[in-house]
Image: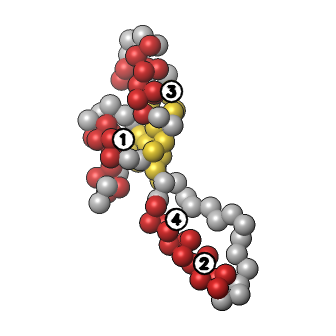
Amino acid sequence: MKIVKDHLSLAWRLVKKSNWNRPHLTLVVGFDGNEDAMTSIRNGNLSATVAQQPEKIGQLAVQAGADVLSGKKVKEKIPVPLKLVTEENVEASTE
């Protein structure tokens, strides 16, 4: 079973309501990357979370602002990569 949800507690309610009898085969992924999600990954209650990168978002926003002020053209949309956080990289992702 795979559950991907943008709200961690809702994802877990779906797992519980499914009466899935093999939780070790259940993949639960949230989209938030907050401290609750990181703790849940460390505790083995969440498989992964997809985290935004606020520092990178800020850096790109400041750069875009500086570019506008200097007369450069700026893209209408500036994509910022998301980061998949799992038990393998959770500690490095919370530093």
Residue drawn at point x = 50 percent, y = 72 percent: 59
**Three-letter amino acid code at the position of disc 2:** Gly
Residue matched to label 4: 57
Q: Amino acid at mark 3?
A: Lys
Q: Which residue is mark 3?
A: 2
> Looking at the image, is mark 2 or mark 4 nearer the viewer?
2
Q: Is residue 61 above or below residue 44?
A: below
In the picture, measured across the screen, residue 54 lies left or right of residue 72, that is left
N-terminal label among 2 and 4: 4
Q: Nearer the viewer, residue 17 or 42?
A: 17
Residue 7 vertical placement versus 58 (above, below):
above
Crowd class of label 4 (few under 14; some 14 to 19; many from 20; radius 10 Å):
some
Residue position marked by numbered label 1 in the rendering: 37
Compare residues 92 and 77 and report the one nearer the observer. 77
Residue ID for mark 2: 65
Instruction: Measure how far apart labels 3 and 4 are at the Cα level.
Output: 29 Å
Q: Earlier in the sequence, mark 1 or mark 3?
A: 3
Q: Residue at x 42, y 21 (%)?
A: 13
Q: Residue furthest left?
A: 43
Tell me the quarter of the picture where residue 65 sits.
bottom right
Image location (x, y in percent) of residue 4: 52, 32
Kind of residue indicated by mark 4: Ile
Q: Give the label, 1 or 2, closer to the camera.
A: 2
Measure the alpha-carbon separation of dots 1 and 4: 20 Å
Mark 2 vs 3, N-terminal side: 3
Mark 1 residue type: Ala
Foreground pick, 85 / 17: 17
> Of label 3 and label 4, which has the lower sequence position?
3
Say if residue 25 shows up in the picture: no
Whole-percent x and y of residue 61?
A: 56, 71
Marks 2 and 3, Cα distance to the nearest angstrom? 40 Å
Contact flag, marks 2 and 3 (Cβ < 8 Å): no
